[in-house]
Image: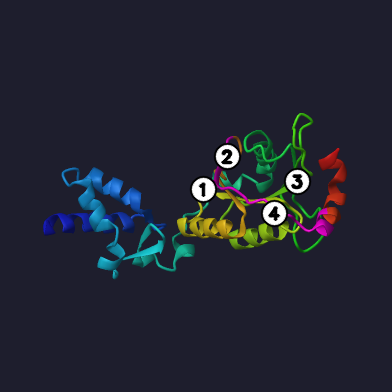
Amino acid sequence: MSNKKEQIISKVIELLKQNPQGVRYSEIVRRVKELLPEIPVNTIRGIVWDLDVQKSNEVYKAERGLFRHVSFRGKDKIVKQPIQSEKRTVKEEDFYELFADYLVGELEDCTKAIPLGGNRFKDKWGTPDVIGTNKSNRSDIIQHEPEIVSAEIKIDDFGLITAFGQACAYKSFSHKVYIVIPKSAFEEDKSRIESLSLIFGIGLIFFDATNKENPNFEIRVRPLKQEPDSFYVNKYMKLIENELFS
């Protein structure tokens, strides 16, 4: 058994050294099982789950379920892979219309959504990249007041803290808010944003920020509906009334 344990630990540490962003528990188990097929999967699980305790000088958990080699601790900016030239040709605005369509056609959170962005609201609290409204259909038995849905989109992962702050600010005039971030972001950052999204009731979407033809939006957290401040709703909606409500 001790020999099997040493083999497993050796493979895990080798795997973590090759992956600066870290590796999820389930992926570690899967990869080690492929490398050591003769060892029962339950044996692998039993050794891997607390490896950060057994080998604290070599392994730590960056987030729940995410194992990372200690040599990468605190070095996110150093180990970050260079942005591919294909990604540099993509602009954030390329995804506004696509996400507006996603809100209406797939999530069905809006009956109408439009790209916005820029500084349309003309204040320091920011302007949503996409904004939409959800109205009752004439055929609905129970009618409801129009709802405002806002979204903040980021194509890189260096401004995620700022983006989350902006998304929170949109709650003052929105019934629902989404933050849309790249799937390629660090696992630590995605996990932190997911946790904050659950706490603040903000919807979280992952997407392929390098592919403006097929961004493959993937919902991770559903937003919670809340009542915004009617003063701010009217203040901002007056600026886009013709575009959004006509």
Label 4 vs 1, first from the N-terminus = 1
Residue type at mark 1: give it: Lys
How far across and down, in percent of the image, does residue 38 sit? 16, 44
Residue 183 - label = 1
How far across and down, in percent of the image, does residue 150 sit? 71, 49
Q: Residue at x 73, y 54 (%)?
A: 227
Residue type at mark 2: give it: Pro
**Distance between the alpha carbons at the discs numbered 2 and 3:** 26 Å
Prevalent SS, magenta region: loop
The answer to which image quadrant residue 17 occupies is: bottom left
Residue beneath disc 2: 215
Would residue 221 be counted in the magenta stretch?
A: yes
As drawn, the residue found furthest toward the front would be 141
The 10 Å Cα crowd at callout 2, few under 14, some 14 to 19, many 20 or more, is some
Residue 226 - label = 4
**Distance between the alpha carbons at the discs numbered 2 and 4:** 28 Å
The 10 Å Cα crowd at callout 3, few under 14, some 14 to 19, many 20 or more, is many
Residue type at mark 4: give it: Gln
How far across and down, in percent of the image, does residue 163 sit? 64, 58
Q: Secondary structure at mark 1?
A: loop
Q: Which residues are magenta?
A: 214-233
Label 1 vs 3, first from the N-terminus = 3
